[in-house]
Image (cartoon, rainbow, N blue to C red):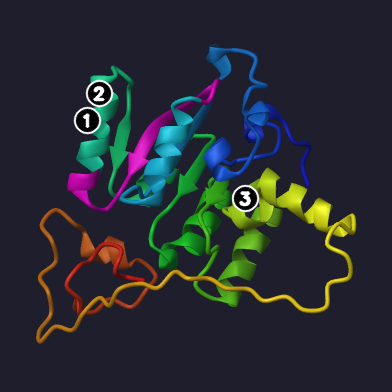
Amino acid sequence: MKKTTRRTFLKGTVTAAAALSSPARLWAQVPGANDDIRVAVIGFNGRGRGHLSEFQSVPGVRVVALCDVDRAVLEAEAKKFRERQQPIETFTDVRRLLERKDIDAVTTATPNHWHALITVWACQAGKDVYVEKPVSHNVWEGRKAVEAARKYQRIVQAGTQSRSSIALREALDWVRAGHLGKIKIARGLCYKRRASIGKIDQPTPIPEGIDYDLWCGPAPKGPLLRKRLHYDWH
C-alpha cells in the first residue's frame, strides 16, 4: 500500500465524522483551508443526507460536487448549498463526476446494486471512497471492490457502525474483562420489521426527472413493479 497522506483523505479514514463512526479528532488534523479535502457525495435521498450534514462541520473538508439520478433530489440539495453561498457542481451521471481531477474522495449512499461498481470506478479514477453498507450485492462484486482498492492503492472504508463505534468497542472490552462471568448461552434479537411494499396490477410509471437507465446501472433493467421507486428497492 502507498504511504497514507492527508491527500488520501484525512489520516486514513473516509468516514464522515462521528455519525459515520470515526472520532472527530481524526477530522481535525487539517492544516489549512488552502489544502482542503474536496469531497463528492453520490446518492443522498436517504443515508447520504447524513453524509452531507456531517461534512458541514468537519474542518478542512469541502463538499464540492453532488450526484444523483433524480433531478428533483439533486436540485433540492444544490439549492441548500447555493443559499449558504457554497459553490457546488451537480451531476446525474457518476461517470462524469469521476472524471473530475480536483475531487479527492467520494462517499456513496446509492441503492445497494450500485455500491461495488461505484467503488471500483472511483478507485480507478484515483479517489478514496466511503461506501455505505452493504459493500456489494454479492460476494464476487465485493471481491472486485477489494481488488480495486489494492490495485489502485486507494483508501476504501465501508459503513460498519455496529462494528466500529466507540461505545460497542468499550462494551466488548468490558465483557472480555470477565465482568459477566462465564457465558454459557447468548441470544441475539433484531426487531426491524419492514412494512410490505404492496402488490400492484401493472408497472408503475417512472417518476419524472429520473434517468431510469442510470438508476438501474449494473442491475437488470425492467418495468417498475412496485408503488415507489425510492427506498422500496430493498
The image position of residue 53, as x and y in percent, is 41, 34
**Magenta stretch: includes residue 22:** no
Does residue 198 appear anywhere in the picture? yes
The image position of residue 43, as x and y in percent, is 36, 50
Tell me, yes or no, whether the two marked residues, 1 and 2, touch with CB atoms within 8 Å.
yes
Name which of mark 3 and mark 1 comes first in the sequence: 1
Query: How far apart are the two marked residues, 1 and 2, measured between alpha carbons?
Result: 5 Å
Tell me, yes or no, whether the two marked residues, 3 and 1, touch with CB atoms within 8 Å.
no
Query: How far apart are the two marked residues, 2 and 3, measured between alpha carbons?
Result: 29 Å
Q: Residue at x 23, y 21 (%)?
A: 83
* Left or right of 38, for residue 233: left
Which label is found at residue 157?
3
Residue that mark 2 sits on:
82
Residue that mark 1 sits on:
79
The amino acid type, in three-letter code, at marker 3 is Gln
Marks counted in the figure total 3
Callout 1 environment at 10 Å: few (<14), some (14 to 19), or many (20+)? few
The image position of residue 192, as x and y in percent, is 44, 69
The image position of residue 93, as x and y in percent, is 31, 51
The amino acid type, in three-letter code, at marker 1 is Lys
Q: Quadrant of residue 89?
A: top left
Callout 3 environment at 10 Å: few (<14), some (14 to 19), or many (20+)? many
Q: Which residues are magenta?
A: 58-73
Q: Nearer the viewer, residue 117 or 227?
A: 227
